[in-house]
């Protein structure tokens, strides 16, 4: 089985997916802005050694994405799985807007850069490593709140809109890339509410809170069972279809 690359792997769901893939014997590339500072990746490296390659990658810096591609290509040549996991919901005093008066242009731009533009740039540069004769999957971790049809609550302007933009990019990729790479399946995935730092301030309102380990298992179950008929779908953790 070809190696997997997890973008946004320093903690949370990303680190959980890396650990699960390594336990299953797969070679894994784990990327983040500063993988050397990740305690989770350091622990996995001690256990799994050479099957884990850590590579710096900042989704807001296209040059770092290009450098990461070169490093992965030197080591592995091609990939069987690429998952964009990193996301931004809050940072320091900044968080999701409850009302229109809280909207800030700089925060909107940063949210879009990480949640929407970043995964698209990763796909732009890594797509050729998914070009081969074996099955391959490109999966972007999205969120149900990025569904326009499913929006019943309002608020969270930047996060909702950036995830909706990410979903459109994913749908576009599912059309364009599979014309050239017919073995490729492109998916948008909703992990549910997971017990991570991203969701920590909002967990009280969650109907169900998943552990990182369970979330990783659920997402990988979808990815590993994906077939060409799933290409371009927006899928929840339980396999249910989510409206765009």
Image: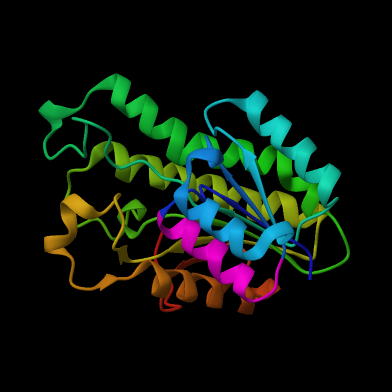
Of all residues shown, which one is farthest toward the right? Answer: 133
Give coordinates of residue 215: x percent, y percent. 41, 70
Q: Determine if the magenta segment contains residue 24.
A: yes
Task: Point out the residue furthest to the front here.
Answer: 46
Report if residue 161 is visible in the image.
yes
Provide residue 234's location: percent of width, then percent of height.
48, 64
Quarter of the view holding residue 132 = bottom right
**Residue occupying image coordinates x 74% and y 62%:** 80
48 to 56, vertically: above or below: below
Where residue 140 sits: x, y (%)? 53, 54
Here the colouring is rainbow
Name the magenta segment's main secondary structure: helix
Look at the image and say whether residue 20 sits in the magenta stretch.
yes
Who is closer to the viewer here, 132 or 186? 132
> Is residue 45 toward the left or the right of residue 208 in the image?
right
To which quarter of the image does residue 242 belong? bottom left
Image quadrant containing the C terminus: bottom left
Q: Residue at x 30, y 42 (%)?
A: 89
Measuring 70% from the left and 69% from the top, which residue is drawn there? Answer: 26
**Residue 105 image position (x, y, % from top left):** 29, 20
On-image quarter of the N terminus: bottom right
- Position of 69 with respect to 100 (left or right) is right
* Quarter of the rendering containing residue 178: bottom right
Identify the magenta region: 12-26
Residue at x 47% of width, y 69% of height:
216
Is 112 placed above or below 45 here? above
Position of residue 200 in the picture relative to residue 74 (left or right): left
Is residue 230 visible in this depiction of the protein?
A: no
């Amino acid at each position: 089985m070809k190696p997997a690359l997890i973008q946004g792997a320093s903690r949370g769901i990303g680190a959980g997916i890396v650990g699960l893939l390594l336990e299953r014997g797969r070679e894994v590339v784990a990327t983040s802005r500063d993988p050397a500072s990740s305690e989770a990746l350091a622990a996995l490296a001690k256990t799994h050694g050479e099957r884990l390659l850590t590579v710096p990658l900042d989704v807001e810096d296209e040059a770092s994405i290009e450098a990461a591609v070169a490093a992965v290509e030197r080591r592995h040549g091609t990939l069987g799985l690429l998952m964009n996991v990193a996301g931004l919901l809050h940072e320091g005093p900044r968080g999701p807007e409850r009302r229109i008066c809280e909207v800030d242009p700089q925060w909107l731009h940063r949210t879009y850069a990480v949640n929407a533009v970043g995964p698209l740039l990763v796909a732009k540069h890594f797509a050729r490593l998914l070009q081969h004769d074996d099955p391959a999957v490109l999966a972007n971790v999205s969120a149900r709140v990025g569904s326009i049809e499913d929006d019943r609550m309002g608020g969270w302007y930047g996060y909702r809109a950036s995830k909706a933009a990410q979903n459109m990019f994913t749908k576009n990729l599912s059309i364009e890339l599979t014309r050239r790479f017919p073995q490729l399946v492109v998916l948008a995935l909703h992990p549910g509410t997971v017990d991570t730092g991203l969701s920590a301030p909002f967990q009280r309102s969650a109907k169900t809170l998943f552990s990182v380990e369970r979330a990783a298992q659920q997402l990988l179950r979808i990815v590993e069972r994906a077939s060409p008929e799933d290409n371009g779908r927006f899928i929840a953790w339980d396999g249910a279809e989510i409206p765009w």
